[in-house]
């Protein structure tokens, strides 16, 4: 779903057969101005999407930026000002705020994780634990916050997780069958394999033909041992039970990536408001 399709679907959900509050009280030709006010400190995100929403409704609306995505913002500051038909502003208000509040919360939490491990080589990644149909923008918010994106979906990377491995009959068989499938279907996709213990890691090292080894629910000490065993032959990723209280311990263990679903599903929306200005 591209941005225009998303905006159209979201407006249909919200407006339905009509914004009758506005239709009943505001003349159709009335014009107005509104400002996006910051009510909480953090990293702002979703400004570009908010602009797209307004311009979708009124292509020649005036949208003046005072902040850009990724800026650190403070209470009382103004992110942007929009001048348009009042009907446009009121239709766009809740959709723009919902998107920006959610994205800003994710960007802010991601930045906290990134800052915690800034002294290490490790990169913070998101996961597929996202809101259906809003994944594109949640993952964009992660990047705005300084993190990286893992795969977008099931189609752009192979990840052989515990269920794949168990249903297939073992790590070695899963890797071998996957490589054969990719070759026979002319697919150029990286392969990541989830391991649950050091014995699994050893099996992957013997089998080979992967890009990355995930160390799932390992302790930091176990991660350090696995990283030493892998010795740079493959990328390494720690996952499972990682949060702000222990992320430094995992980064210190030498892993290349840390994937944390929490940067999206534990993020708290930032408090923002779109306030009318009389003109």
Image: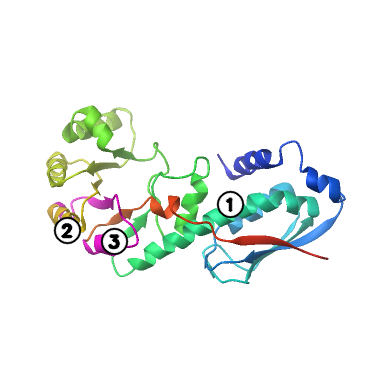
The answer to whether marks 3 and 2 mark residues whose Cβ atoms lie closer than 8 Å is no
Where residue 21 appears, x then y in whole percent?
79, 46
- Name the N-terminal-most of marks 3 and 2: 2
Q: Is residue 102 magenta?
A: no
Where residue 176 appears, x then y in whole percent?
20, 32
Q: Which residues are magenta?
A: 230-253
- Name the N-terminal-most of marks 2 and 1: 1
Residue with the mark numbered 1: 99
SS of the residue at dot 3? loop
Q: Whole-Å distance between the Cαs marked 3 and 1?
A: 30 Å
Closest to the observer: 274 or 6? Answer: 274
Q: Residue at x 85, y 46 (%)?
A: 24
Residue with the mark numbered 2: 221
Where residue 87 appears, x then y in whole percent?
79, 50
**In-image side of 39 versus 158 (left or right):** right
Dot 2: within a 10 Å radius of its alpha carbon, few (fewer than 14), some, or many (20 or more) residues? few
Q: Residue at x 44, y 52 (%)?
A: 264
Q: Residue at x 64, y 49 (%)?
A: 95
Where residue 137 appears, x then y in whole percent?
52, 49
- Name the N-terminal-most of marks 3 and 1: 1
The C terminus lies in quadrant: bottom right
The answer to whether marks 3 and 1 mark residues whose Cβ atoms lie closer than 8 Å is no
Closest to the observer: 216 or 175? Answer: 216
Where residue 33 sits, quadrant-wise, is: bottom right
Q: Whole-Å distance between the Cαs marked 2 and 1?
A: 39 Å
Q: Is residue 175 visible?
A: yes
Where residue 253 sits, quadrant-wise, is: bottom left
Is residue 119 depicted above or below 82 in this figure?
below
Query: Residue 246, which numbered label?
Result: 3
Dot 3: within a 10 Å radius of its alpha carbon, few (fewer than 14), some, or many (20 or more) residues? few
Where residue 97 sits, quadrant-wise, is: bottom right
């Amino acid at each position: 779903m591209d941005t225009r399709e998303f905006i159209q679907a979201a407006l249909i959900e919200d407006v339905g057969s009509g914004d009758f509050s506005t239709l009943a009280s505001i003349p159709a030709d009335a014009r107005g101005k509104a400002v996006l006010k910051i009510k909480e400190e953090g990293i702002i995100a979703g400004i570009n999407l908010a602009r797209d929403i307004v311009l979708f409704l009124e292509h020649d609306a005036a949208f003046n930026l005072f902040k850009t995505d990724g800026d650190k913002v403070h209470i009382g500051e103004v992110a942007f000002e929009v001048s348009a038909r009042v009907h446009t502003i009121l239709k766009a208000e809740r959709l723009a705020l919902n998107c920006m509040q959610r994205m800003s919360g994710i960007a802010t939490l991601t930045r906290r994780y990134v800052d915690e491990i800034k002294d290490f080589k490790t990169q913070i990644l998101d996961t597929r634990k996202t809101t259906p149909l809003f994944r594109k923008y949640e993952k964009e918010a992660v990047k705005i916050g300084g993190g990286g994106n893992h795969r977008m979906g099931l189609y752009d990377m192979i990840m052989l997780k515990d269920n794949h491995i168990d249903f297939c009959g073992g790590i070695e068989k899963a890797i071998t069958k996957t490589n054969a499938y990719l070759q026979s279907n002319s697919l150029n996709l990286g392969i990541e394999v989830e391991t649950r213990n050091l014995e699994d890691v050893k099996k992957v090292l013997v089998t080979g033909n992967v890009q990355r080894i995930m160390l799932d629910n390992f302790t930091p000490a176990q991660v350090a041992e696995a990283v030493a065993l892998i010795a740079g032959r493959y990328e390494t990723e720690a996952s499972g039970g990682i949060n702000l209280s222990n992320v430094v311990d995992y980064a210190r263990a030498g892993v290349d990536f840390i994937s944390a679903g929490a940067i999206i599903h534990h993020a708290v929306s930032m408090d923002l408001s779109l306030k009318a200005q009389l003109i």
